[in-house]
Image (cartoon, rainbow, N blue to C red):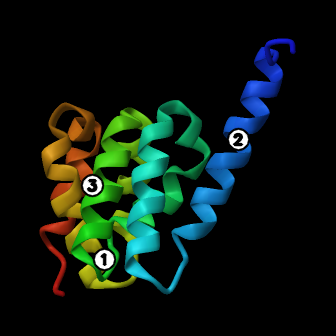
Amino acid sequence: ISEPSAMDTQKALSSCAEAYALQLESPHPLVRRSAAVALGGLGAGARPHAAALAAAASDGDAGVRKAAKAALERLGTIGADALAARLLDSDAEDRRMVVAALGPLENLAAPHIAALAARLNDVD
């Protein structure tokens, strides 16, 4: 039995990440939370799904939000950028959750301070 090539490993990682990202849309909070945890465990392999994780950071379930925020933090700048993109969301509650998620990212959120400050003037 031969060792898998780097390309085979990358394809498998990409397939896993895609499957986990699809589960972020599950109607079941435990499935969504598990998918966010799994994506966080993939590290850089989850980068293509940063936007889906950013959406999950506004999930109605606290466990899903926590897992998504942790996964985004593991993605570093890409995770912070994906969250910051949601500062323009039309839903005020989603924007508040994004602001709360960016706060703990500290230095990673620094490039988005102007966008965060602009949200202070939101009427809602």
- Label 3 vs label 2, nearer the camera: 2
Labels 3 and 1: the sequence-earlier one: 1
The disc, 3 or 2, on the residue closer to the chain's N-terminal end is 2
Label 2 sits on a secondary structure element that is helix
Q: CA distance from mark 3 to mark 1?
A: 15 Å
The x, y position of residue 49, in whole percent, is 57, 51
Q: Amino acid at mark 3?
A: Ala
Q: Which mark is residue 115?
A: 3
Q: Which residue is label 2 attached to?
A: 14
Q: Amino acid at mark 1?
A: Asp
Judged from the image, the secondary structure of the residue bearing numbered disc 3 is: helix
Mark in front: 3 vs 1: 1
Residue position marked by numbered label 1 in the rendering? 94
User: Looking at the image, which residue is at 73% across and 47% down?
Assistant: 15
Q: Residue at x 20, y 46 (%)?
A: 113
Disc count in the image? 3
- Residue 70 image point, x, y percent: 29, 48
* Label 2: how many Cα within 10 Å (few below 14, some 14–19, many 20+): some
Please tell me whether mark 1 sits on a helix, a strand or a loop.
Answer: helix
Number of other residues with Cα within 10 Å of mark 3, as a class: few under 14, some 14 to 19, many 20 or more: some
Above or below, 26 against 23 in this view is: below
Label pair 3/1, CB-CB below 8 angstroms: no
Q: Residue at x 31, y 57 (%)?
A: 67
Question: Residue 12's x, y, as percent?
Answer: 74, 37
Q: Is residue 73 above or below residue 51?
A: above
| Viewer-closest of 58 and 29 | 29
Residue farthest toward the right in the current orientation of the protein: 1
